[in-house]
């Protein structure tokens, strides 16, 4: 195999990856913030109002990486606050993309109320070019819990990744 030595001029003119690399590229990024607190005493997952982000993939073979940074509040000692992510494709019903009874995050303290910094993330294959909404769902184990702490702001981001 022959080696090619590049001059400094060649390196400074390099502006992009070769066109042959078609997968794994970030095609679009959508962001949203939400600062209103949501509370529930439901023991089943319920939609956290306002904690959602929508993205429309350009190809059904592309993936979506969702990342949400928030705070779970157990509101009292001994309570568990669970969180997960659901997907809704335009005109359809919400689907738990994690499919785990406990979700993907939990906040708990045996001794006191605690605000747990939480990041929810998932790589999803929605297989559509319709609008897709990702939403945080929460539930509790034994009492009212909340999402978002005092004076906090949740950051929601969705990345479309070339498939």
Image: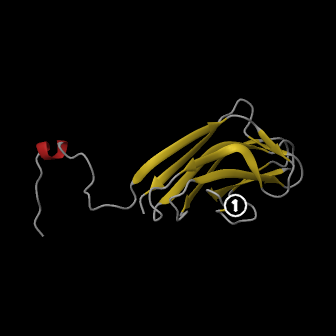
Residue 8 located left or right of residue 119:
left
Q: Mark 1: give few (<14), some (14-19) or many (20+) Cα within 10 Å.
A: few
- Residue at 17%, 46% in the rendered image: 11
**Quarter of the rendering occupied by the N terminus:** bottom left
Place of residue 58 in the rendered image (x, y in percent of width and height, measured from the top left): 45, 56
Farthest residue, direction right: 143
What colour scheme has been applied to the protein in the rendered image?
secondary structure
Q: Give the number of marks.
A: 1
Residue 156 located left or right of residue 147:
left
- Residue at 55%, 61% in the rendered image: 124
Q: Would residue 128 be seen by someone viewing this image from the given angle?
A: yes
- Residue 39, quarter of picture: top right
Place of residue 45 in the rendered image (x, y in percent of width and height, measured from the top left): 78, 56
Farthest residue, direction top: 151
**Quarter of the rendering occupied by the C terminus:** bottom left
Foreground: 65 or 82? 65
- Residue at 71%, 59% in the rendered image: 103
The residue carrying mark 1 is 93
Q: Is residue 34 above or below residue 98?
A: above
Q: Would residue 117 be seen by someone viewing this image from the given angle?
A: no
Place of residue 78 in the rendered image (x, y in percent of width and height, measured from the top left): 87, 50
- Residue at 82%, 58% in the rendered image: 44
């Amino acid at each position: 195999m022959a080696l090619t030595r590049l001059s400094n001029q060649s390196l400074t003119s390099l502006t992009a990856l070769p066109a042959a690399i078609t997968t794994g590229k970030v095609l679009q990024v959508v962001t949203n913030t939400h600062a209103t607190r949501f509370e529930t005493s439901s023991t089943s997952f319920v939609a956290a109002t306002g904690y959602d982000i929508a993205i429309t993939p350009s190809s059904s073979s592309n993936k979506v990486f969702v990342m949400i940074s928030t705070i779970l509040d157990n509101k009292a000692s001994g309570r568990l606050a669970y969180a997960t992510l659901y997907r809704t494709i335009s005109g359809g019903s919400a689907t738990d993309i994690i499919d785990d009874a406990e979700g993907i995050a939990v906040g708990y303290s045996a001794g006191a109320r605690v605000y747990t910094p939480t990041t929810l993330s998932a790589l999803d294959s929605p297989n559509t070019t319709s609008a897709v909404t990702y939403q945080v769902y929460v539930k509790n184990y034994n009492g009212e819990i909340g999402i978002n702490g005092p004076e906090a702001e949740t950051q929601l981001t969705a990345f479309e990744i070339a498939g």
